Structure formats: C-alpha cells, structure tokens
Amino acid sequence: MNRKHRRKFWVTIGIIVAVLVAFIGVGEAYFFNVAFVPGKKAVLNKYSSKNKKDPLAEKKRWYEDAKKQRWYIKSNTGDYRLDANYIPKKNSDKAVVLLHGFTNNKDTMGPYAAMFHQMGYNVLMPDARAHGQSQGKYIGYGWPEKYDVRKWVRKLIAEEGKKQKIVIFGVSMGGATTMMASGIKMPSQVKAYIEDCGYTSVRDEFLHEAKDIYHLPGPVGQFFVNGLSVIAKANLGFYLGDASAVNSVEKNNKPMLFIHGGKDPFVPTKMVYANYKAAKGPKQLWIAKKAKHARSFETYPREYQRRVSEFLKKYV
C-alpha cells in the first residue's frame, strides 16, 4: 500500500471511529436522560394497562377525601426540599412510610394509604426526590433515597413520639428503596419492611430494560449499561451495580414480606427469589400469580390486605 492509499485508509478509519464515538455519546446521553432525569417516560407505555373496573376505586375515593397534613424535610444530600402527605390515625402508636414507584408520586399510593389507615396506622407518604412535589435533579432508584427515608422516619418519631412502631412499605422502585433502606442502620422504632415488586439491583433492571424495551442484543445492552454506570457514578455518586437490593437485605435482620406479581414483565418475577433468598431476618414470600407489575393489590385486593395484615400482626 503506497503512502496515498495509507493516508486515505487512516482517514477513513478516523471518520468511522469519530462517527462511532458520536453515536455512542448521543446514545448514552439519551439513555441517561430517559433513566435519570425527571419527566414523563414514554418508553414505559409498553407496561401500562387499565382495567375497565377498578377494584381499588373506593380506597382511592377515601384517599381523595382524607384530611392530609403537609410535611417537609431536607434531603440527605443535595439540600432538596422533600414533600410528603401525612394522614394521622387517632390514638395510634403504629405508623407506615409508603414509598411510590418510578415516575409516580405520593398520590398514587392512595389505595395503600387507605388500607393501612383502616388497619390502624398513621400514614406518611413522601414524594421521592425528583418526583411529585419534591425537588431533585436526578432519580436515584432508591440508592440515595434510602437515607431520605431514614430522615422521614426520624421526622415521624419527632412528631409522634418514640413509642411509634414503624413499618416501611414500597412498590416497584419504592420496593427496591425499602430493601435498600433495610440495609442501613435505622431507628429502633422501625419494626418491619414490606416490599412489592422491587428489583435486585439497578444494573440488573437496566439490563432487562435494554433487552425488553430497546431489543438490544446482550453484549450491546451490557455495553450501554456499563457506559450508563460510569455516567451515574460521575453524576450521582454510585455505579449501577452498587445499588443492590440483594446486598442490602443481606444486612437486615428485621422481618420482611416480599410480594411480586407472577406475570410481571417490567421487573421480572425471578428477581424476587434472589431478594428473598438473600434476606437474613424473618421473611415471607407471596407470588400473586396472575398479577402484572405493581398490580398485585389491584388483582387480589382482599388477599393482599389479608396477607399484609397477618404479617404485621406477628411483628408490629
């Protein structure tokens, strides 16, 4: 190959590399924006579903009519103002902290608030950072939020007294946050945890979404998720693999109830088995066989409340 052809060859290679780098950079920026920046997420439309008849309609009406207090704290990091609704139960020494899912807010937990209030609990319903009326630059998928949850628990104790017996309950991202919160030192007033359809780790969930939503082949999906992990470390302070529910529940010795839909396409049902196996404290597992993602309560409203109530009667 003469000098002229060699030069042309390397120029061509350079152009190809530049295009690939640009493509990768744009792709990573897009995925980071979809994954971590607050806003509507059209990609989740694949998993949305509505029943003609809403079995939780009565509970939703109760929540709409319930008198709510507004509580605020500062986030554990970032100095964001976090917002919550609080619904007291007269003369109760039991309380629950309800944690919502990805792109949702405290109001979407209304049916659960009705259930717990009926069971005799004070109900605290925070908006996670970067959700609802809480401030925040990025969505942390439970990893930084677990420390916010601890601050909400301390706020609850300060307001209602040290005799409170507290349960932490979450659905989807809130379920993962619940498990992650179980792995840090909590006030002794926290007596039990209930997680519904939480993922094993943020990395595992992103790998699943890369395949299921974007149809990326395994190696390509891993490449992009690894890139996202580096960007997450730079912007949020953790790698995606660090944000592990499995590793968190291994550190917990308090009771935990695991719930998961048997037909969950978003957070695969198999993930709950890994979470359940890792838990060290007293534990129970319920697979709601016909339920899709975050639809176990909706699909089995009576059984759901019964199982939650029976579990808590043992430990709270």
Image: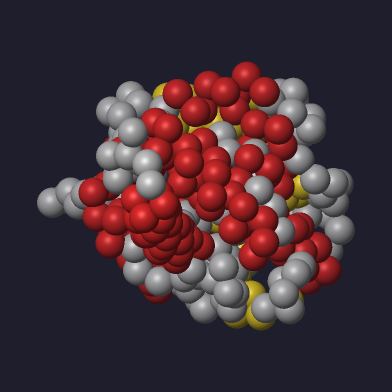
Name of the residue lying farthest toward the left? 52
Residue situated in front as seen by the camera: 277 or 108: 277
Residue situated in front as seen by the camera: 43 or 312: 43
Q: Position of residue 144 (x, y in %)?
A: 69, 58
Name of the residue lying farthest toward the front? 2
Quick check: 20 above or below 218? below
Residue 260 appears in the figure: yes
Q: Residue 103 lies in what quarter of the image?
A: bottom left
Q: Position of residue 38 (x, y in %)?
A: 46, 70
Residue 91 appears in the figure: no
Q: Is residue 28 left or right of residue 232?
A: left
Residue situated in front as seen by the camera: 57 or 37: 37
Quick check: 5 above or below 30? above
Q: Residue 176 lies in what quarter of the image?
A: top right
Residue displayed at 29% across by 56% down? 43
Q: Is residue 95 left or right of residue 212?
A: right
Residue displayed at 83% across by 68% down? 158
